Amino acid sequence: MDQTNQRQTDKRLPLLDAYRGLAAILVLLYHYLHIYPTRANTTQPTAEWGKYGVHIFFAISGYVILKSAQNAKSSSAFLMQRTLRLMPTFWCCMTLTYIVTTLLPLPWRSTSIKDYFLNLPLLTSCLNLALPDSFEANSIDGVYWSLERESLFYIAVAGLIATRLITRVEMLCFGWLVAKVLTYALPQKYRSLADLLLNTDYAEFFTIGIASLRIAVGGPNIQRVALIILSVLATTLPHLSIKTLVALFAVFALQLPHRFPFKSTPLKPLMFIGAISYPLYLLHQNIGFSMLLYPLKGANPILALGLTTLLSLTLATALHYSIEVYATVRLKARLSRTIKPSGDAAT
């Protein structure tokens, strides 16, 4: 293993934050310029291509989560780290979204206090699908679906750590891609269940991230290159689309962070947005829609978009520093002093 590459993958990579910033901007544009006009019947929807920012997030996740898994002392330590990373910020953002959309309700989305509490586990749509007759809840914000995919991925990775199969992750990814292909042979109702159980819908993007990290640390080989090629080919299912171009971008982009750890000035705005991208992603959609629908209704469209984006960035920055930087870091430190690692550490 190249020790320089190993050291580089063991620390935060600024370029990854720039990619997160790019993905966050794409998603924000998609929601403000495509989803809102469609639902509010205002202007002509545009920027549909922005929805592919989520795919970039999934590829980045495959890269950084495997890196975290390789450094984790145990599966429980890994899950604790992921829980502390996601849940405090999620609960704060969800609470703020619920308050705003209760005061300034969206005509196309109805939520109740029951929905609020049922959203707390961050697996609402999974439970809706798994228990359709006994569980029904509306998401406080529609963006939560992607966090559920992330959570399922984290659980799977924790299982690999616990069973010491994390070293075989590349071979398992081949099986994951095969499972994705096989789901297309199933009737739609069974395909949805299979996708829930196996989390196959975005398997190719998680896999691109995983293979990219393996190449960053250990260099390319036939298996890793084949994994990249098959992942890109999987994006053509069920038909060729922009997804394939996004996958090719991710393949290229994820080869750069460990090779060029630069912090150039032109990238700093993107890197900052990337640093606050998690609360920005959670907050921007429904709170932004409420702002556009009520206090900014009838305003110049460019001014309304600018003010809404500024509000989202301001709220995300405040939550990033108060929750992600201050509260969560201190909570992690306190827990690390009180919880001893279990004996299922990966080797």
Image (cartoon, rainbow, N blue to C red):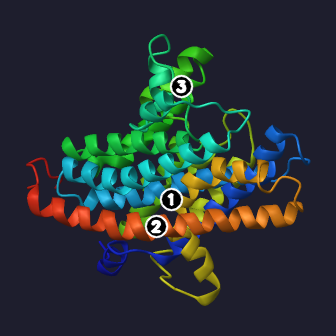
Find disc 3 in the rendering and name its residue.
Answer: 182
Residue 176 location (% of width, % of height): 44, 37
Q: Which is more toward the observer, 239 or 339?
A: 339
Q: Is residue 286 left or right of residue 44?
A: left
Q: Earlier in the sequence, mark 3 or mark 1?
A: 3
Residue 236, placed above or below residue 217: above
Q: Amino acid at mark 1?
A: Tyr
Q: Is residue 226 left or right of residue 347?
A: right
Find disc 2 in the rendering and name its residue.
Answer: 320
Give the mark toward the camera: 2 or 1: 2
Q: Amino acid at mark 3?
A: Leu
Give the mark toward the camera: 2 or 3: 2
- Label 2 with label 1: CB-CB less than 8 Å: yes
User: Quarter of the image holding residue 145?
Assistant: top right
Give the mark toward the camera: 3 or 1: 1
Q: Earlier in the sequence, mark 2 or mark 3?
A: 3
Find disc 1 in the rendering and name its residue.
Answer: 278
User: Quarter of the image holding residue 281?
Assistant: bottom right
Q: Earlier in the sequence, mark 2 or mark 1?
A: 1
In this rendering, does residue 244 appear at all?
no
Residue 210 location (% of width, % of height): 43, 55
Residue 247 location (% of width, % of height): 62, 54
Q: Which is more toward the observer, 73 or 208?
A: 73
Q: Is residue 129 left or right of residue 300?
A: left
- Element at badge 2? helix
Q: Which is more toward the observer, 202 or 281?
A: 281
Q: Residues within 10 Å of mark 1 (few under 14, many from 20)?
A: many
Q: Is residue 154 left or right of residue 256?
A: left
- Element at badge 3? helix
